[in-house]
Amino acid sequence: MDKYHRADVIGIERENERDENYKSTKNPQIDSTRTGENYHIIERSDTYLAYIDKRIKELAPKRKIKDDAVLINSFILGSDGEFFNRLSPYQQQNFFFDCTKFFADRYGAENVISAVVHNDETTPHLHLNLIPVLDGRLCSKQLFDRKALRALQTDFHEAVGKKWGLKRGEIGSTAEHLDTTAFKLKKMKEETVAAVLQQADAQAVIDEAEKVRCEVAPAKALLEDYERATSSGTPFSGKKKDAEIIALRTKNGQLEREIATRGKDQSDLFKQLQEAMQTNDRMQPTYDMAAEILSAYPDEFKELLQKARTKNSPTPFRKNANGSGKGGK
């Protein structure tokens, strides 16, 4: 969750409501060619500031609003790429509708400034901007203190997360309260680790293709030598010539079968090699970003890479106390 004061509102509105011409120096994940795929769950006809001022006027507070008052509490709602890959675009929209409805029911639909889905970054996510109103007045500090945020996460999981098969975040984890910048940096690190692991798999295919090429080379050279020998004629005659020809034909048959088998293997590996090289080309921007993140955050990157490898390692089979083969919770 992020907190925004009056001086911040115009900037956050530009970022949330961006079009194809929007440029950001802080968020390299934005793909402007896909910005047209962004859409709203809730959209107001007023600007953010105009809507906030209108809402404050309706509240008619007894005291003047302080200059440093929090006017917007902003939430990023989403999940990982694996979750969204299982959903159709229609199902994704329904998921974000459920997220928005939860906040609108809990804090008042009239206090939701906007709910906009961004599809122009690595994974879809919802930016929900809320005016923090409690008992008819602005009160972000009381409405979203640490205890309230924990309760919010628990209730959100019960109402939305379980319905969509999501796991609840670890209670008490600092990851629950990451601001927007830290959240996106964390996502970038995770995606970079995945890209590095994918690159390692692609390199393994390339190495295997090169190994097969080297193994096939001697047999191919032998066949070429044979073809040259048969085209130049032989000095033999009679039975000796016939025996030599039979021996050569037999050897030729063996070589052709070997070449055919290895040629098929090489063709399959060549296709994998092409796919691997294309994967490397696609992932190059991510590799470059990985280098930047590794340079700026070496310790965090190593820790995240270790966690990723540990997570991908096979989990030992364990029995419960009752002897069943099922794992625990």
Image (cartoon, rainbow, N blue to C red):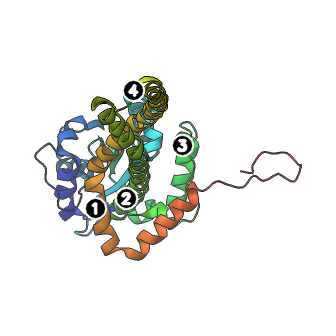
The residue positioned 10% from the left and 46% from the top of the image is 21
- Give the Cα separation between the discs numbered 2 and 1: 7 Å
Q: Earlier in the sequence, mark 1 or mark 4?
A: 4
- Residue 80: which disc? none
Judging by the rendered image, the residue that carries numbered circle 1 is: 289
- Horizontal relation, residue 303 to residue 132: left or right: right
- The span from disc 3 to disc 1 (Cα, nearest Å) is 31 Å
Between 8 and 249, the one nearer to me in the picture: 249
Query: Residue at point 39% right, 58% down?
Result: 196
Residue type pointed to by label 3: Gly
Circles 1, 4 touching at the beta carbon (< 8 Å): no
Q: Nearer the viewer, mark 3 or mark 2?
A: 2
Between tags 2 and 4, which lies in front?
A: 4
- Dot 2 or dot 1: first in sequence order is 2
Residue 195, x across and y down, in percent: 38, 54
Circle 3 or circle 1, nearest the eye? 1
User: How many residues crowd mark 2 within 10 Å: few (<14), some (14–19), many (20+)?
Assistant: many
Do residues under tags 2 and 1 come within 8 Å of each other at their CB atoms? Answer: yes
Is 136 or 176 nearer to us in this picture? 176
User: Is any part of residue 237 visible from this angle?
Assistant: yes
- For label 3, count other residues whose C-alpha is less than 10 Å away and answer few (under 14), some (14-19) or many (20+): some
Q: Which residue is mark 2?
A: 192
Residue 70 image offset from top left, x and y in percent: 30, 63
- In this figure, which residue is indicated by the disc labeled 3? 161
